Amino acid sequence: MSSANAPRGPIEPLSRAALFSSATGFDESRCRKALEFALGRIRLNLDAFAPDRYPAPSSLRNVFPIPNDEWTSSFWPGMLWLAYEASGERIYRDAAVAHLPDFRARLDTRRATGTHDLGFLYSLSCVPA
């Protein structure tokens, strides 16, 4: 390993490594069920978070859909891209692509762009496209 690629500083070992290497009940079937559950939840929310609506960072009177003006707006399209990658189902891809014009409009109109989170917003929502 060259000095340019060498780790910097001391490397701290995990103090309880055995805790993470001997997980029980973790198998492919259980992971598949968890993925199917997550995909089902995303599918259930496709209409609620249409191309110009996004989950809010928190609810107000149990209402979550908001316009694209929060730092969390990219979470939903990001989940859609991950759902598409995991399942190959175009419904998730199409829903993610449908959000792209809204993210373009956010830049064009400078809506809520005075934030350090722009890279974060666009790396989850537009870069995967």
Image (cartoon, grey):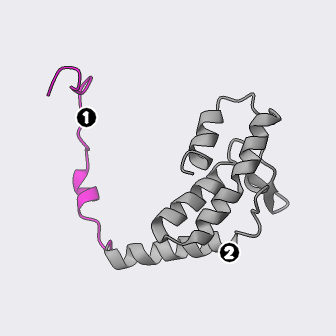
Which badge, 2 or 1, comes first in the chain's sequence?
1
Could you give the CA–CA distance between mark 2 and mark 1, rounded to whole angstroms? 43 Å
Callout 2 secondary element: helix
Q: Is residue 7 above or below residue 88?
A: above
Number of callouts in the render? Answer: 2
The residue positioned 64% from the left and 64% from the top of the image is 94
Residue 39 picture location, percent across and down = 55, 72
Residue plotted at (26% across, 23% down):
9
Q: Is residue 21 above or below residue 71?
A: below
* Magenta highlight range: 1-26
**Occupied quadrant, residue 55:** bottom right
Q: Is residue 122 visible?
A: yes
Q: Type of residue at label 1?
A: Glu
Asked if residue 69 shows in the view, the reply is no
State the residue position of label 2: 44
* Name of the residue lying farthest toward the right: 61
**Would you say residue 109 sits in the magenta stretch?**
no
Left or right: residue 33 versus residue 81 is: left
SS assignment for the magenta stretch, majority: loop
For label 1, the residue is 12
* Mark 2 or 1, closer to the camera: 2
Residue drawn at x 58%, y 47% is 124
